[in-house]
Image: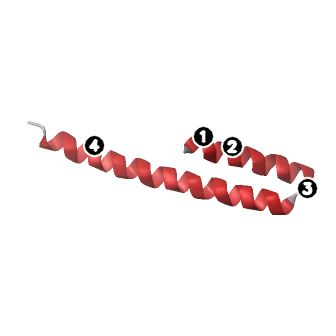
Amino acid sequence: MLRWAVIFLIIALVAALFGFTGIAAAAAGIAKFLFFLFLVICLIFFIIGISAARRIP
């Protein structure tokens, strides 16, 4: 998922470079959404990992 966020960020930068502001804004929005979704999922798995490690004797 982080790879897709980076891909959309690169697409946004290239589109902004060539002046396609609508495409650049859309790609940047998608990249931002995917990045924050990645962070939330990473945090959830981190919390699950800590709680699972505490239960193992």
Residue 24 image position (x, y, % from top left): 79, 57
Residue 1 image position (x, y, % from top left): 54, 45
Which element carries disc 4, helix, strand or loop? helix
Which element carries disc 1, helix, strand or loop? helix
Relative horizontal placement of residue 48, taking residue 1 as reference (left or right): left
Badge number at residue 46: none
Which element carries disc 3, helix, strand or loop? loop
- Label 2 to label 4: alpha-carbon separation: 29 Å
List the residue tagged with mark 2: 7
Nearer the N terminus, badge 2 or badge 4? 2
Nearer the N terminus, badge 3 or badge 1? 1
- Report crowding for label 1: few under 14, some 14 to 19, many 20 or more residues within 10 A (C-alpha): few
Foreground pick, 55 / 23: 23
- Report crowding for label 3: few under 14, some 14 to 19, many 20 or more residues within 10 A (C-alpha): few
Check if mark 2's residue and mark 1's residue have beta carbons within 8 Å.
yes
Relative horizontal placement of residue 53, taking residue 25 as reference (left or right): left
- Label 2 to label 1: alpha-carbon separation: 6 Å
Nearer the N terminus, badge 2 or badge 3? 2
- Report crowding for label 4: few under 14, some 14 to 19, many 20 or more residues within 10 A (C-alpha): few
Q: Amino acid at mark 2?
A: Ile
Q: Amino acid at mark 1?
A: Arg
Q: Residue furthest right?
A: 18
List the residue tagged with mark 1: 3
Nearer the N terminus, badge 4 or badge 3? 3
Q: Amino acid at mark 3?
A: Gly
- Report crowding for label 2: few under 14, some 14 to 19, many 20 or more residues within 10 A (C-alpha): some
Check if mark 3's residue and mark 1's residue have beta carbons within 8 Å.
no
List the residue tagged with mark 3: 19
Check if mark 2's residue and mark 4's residue have beta carbons within 8 Å.
no
- Label 2 to label 3: alpha-carbon separation: 18 Å
List the residue tagged with mark 4: 49
